[in-house]
Image (cartoon, grey):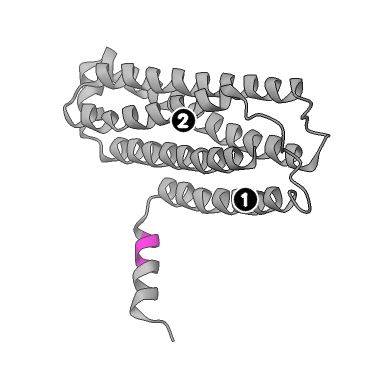
Amino acid sequence: MKTKTDHGWVQKMEKMHPYQTIVYLGMVGSGLIFLFLTIAFLSSFYPQNNLEGYQLPTPFWLSTFVLVASSFLINRLIHFYHKGRPYHLERFLWVIFSLGLLFTALQFWGWSDLNQQGIDFAGIPSGSYLFVLTGIHILHLLGVLIFVIVLLWEVHQSVLDPVKDLVFITNPFVKMKLKLFITYWHFVDFIWLLLFILFSIAF
């Protein structure tokens, strides 16, 4: 027998836009993947910590600051949308996109630093899981950056055409996409912060 709570969840799912359903289910699925890999990463330390004596790459620290900064800035997108400022919205999207690319570049630099220390994908188990975790995280971020490109194209069209600008600002579907983008960006940021804390402890 189904409870009222069960019916409430079903009704909420039915009212969701397909984009919302895909994003939320994607977050749950991604969270489970990172959880299982994290457990495997922690298990690789027994009976001995294979990363002891190595140093956490400086680029990982820098990339953390970049991603945290982007999370503070990204909240401004909804503000510019509500104020009807597509030009400022476009500029901030470019800033977010650039910070995402910078984070990715710093991650590759971090991988190079690990290789110089003697940690590679085919080496010690802990190092292998570290590469897998950071690599999957980069793939998630690249997926979000593709979404940024789509948003940039839509916003740019509204900047060029006053009619499209009016439709863009008054379209609830656009607002929903912006909110989904912000939510998923924070999710990617949160995952990295957890991984970074884990890596810091491991080293």
* Residue 191 image point, x, y percent: 51, 42
Image spot of residue 26 (x, y percent):
52, 48
Q: Residue furthest bottom?
A: 1
Along the line of sight, the residue nearer the viewer: 58 or 167: 58
Residue at left 38%, top 67%? Answer: 9
Which quadrant: the N terminus? bottom left
| Image: 16 above or below 100 | below
Question: Which quadrant holds residue 11?
Answer: bottom left
Q: Nearer the viewer, residue 35 or 64?
A: 64
Query: Which quarter of the picture shows residue 122?
Result: top right
Q: Is residue 104 magenta?
A: no
Q: Identify the element where label 1 is drawn.
A: helix
Magenta region, residue range: 10-14
Where residue 134 sits: x, y (%)?
Answer: 63, 35
Amino acid, disc 1: Ile
Between discs 2 and 1, the one toward the N terminus: 1
The residue under the point 69% across, 47% down is: 41
Left or right: where does residue 93 sit relative to residue 116? left
- Along the viewing direction, whichever of 42 and 70 lies nearer the viewer: 42
Frontmost of labels 2 and 1 is: 1
Q: Is residue 136 above or below residue 115?
A: below
- Work out which residue is located at the far right of the displayed protein and give it: 122
State whether residue 129 is above or below residue 13.
Answer: above
Judged from this view, the residue extending furthest toward the front is 53
Badge 2 crowding class, 10 Å Cα cut-off, few under 14, some 14 to 19, many 20 or more, is some
Question: In the structure shown, which secondary structural element does the residue marked by tag 2 occupy?
Answer: helix
Give amino acid for label 2. Answer: Phe
Q: Name the residue carrying label 1.
A: 33
Q: Residues within 10 Å of mark 1 (few under 14, many from 20)?
A: few
Q: Residue at x 71, y 52 (%)?
A: 40
Main secondary structure of the magenta stretch: helix
Q: Which mark is residue 147?
A: 2
